[in-house]
Image (cartoon, rainbow, N blue to C red):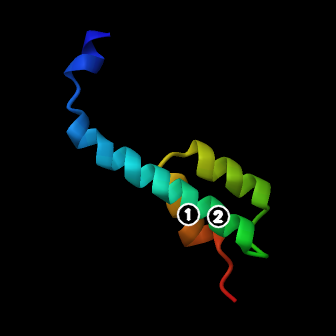
Amino acid sequence: MEELLNVNWALLAPIFIIQFILLLVAIIDLVRIEKTNGPKWLWVIIILFVNIIGPILYFVIGRRNQ
């Protein structure tokens, strides 16, 4: 418990904010887009559970260029 009090939250807060924004934008884009490379349910799992890398993978690999 004392470790949480000694953490410098000013350094970690931007990482958490960026992670949340990436997650939110990726989920909104996934709902709006018609076709993806792979099933949508799999991309939802990847985006939600693979933290920062999941939304980045979705934007690089998951979106189908039309």
Depicted 5 relative to depicted 54: above or below: above
Relative to 6, is 43 on the left or the right? right
Label 1 belongs to which residue?
Answer: 25
Which residue is painted at 72% across and 72% down in the image?
32
Is residue 37 something one can see in this rendering? no
Residues at marks 2 and 1 touching, judged by CB atoms closer than 8 Å:
yes
Residue where numbered disc 2 is placed:
28
* Displayed quadrant of residue 18: bottom left
Q: Quadrant of residue 59?
A: bottom right
Left or right? Give the position of 45 relative to 26: right
Furthest residue in direction bottom, as rendered: 66
Name the quadrant of the N terminus.
Answer: top left
Visible in this render: residue 48?
A: yes
Q: Residues within 10 Å of mark 1 (few under 14, many from 20)?
A: few
Residue 35 is tagged as none
Spot occupied by residue 13 in the image (x, y as percentages of width and height): 31, 42
Disc 2 residue type (three-letter): Ile
Q: Secondary structure at mark 2?
A: helix
Dot 1 amino acid type: Val
The residue that appears at 47% across and 57% down in the rendered structure is 21
In the image, 59: left or right of 5?
right
Q: Residues within 10 Å of mark 2 (few under 14, many from 20)?
A: few
Residue furthest toward the top? 1
Residue 4: percent from left, percent from top: 29, 19
**What residue do we see at 60% from left, 69% from top?**
61
Q: Position of residue 66 (x, y in %)?
A: 70, 89
Q: Residue at x 55, y 63 (%)?
A: 25
Callout 1 secondary element: helix
Vertical comparison of 23 with 8: above or below: below
**Image spot of residue 53 (x, y percent):** 48, 53
Report the Cα–Cα distance between label 2 and label 1: 5 Å
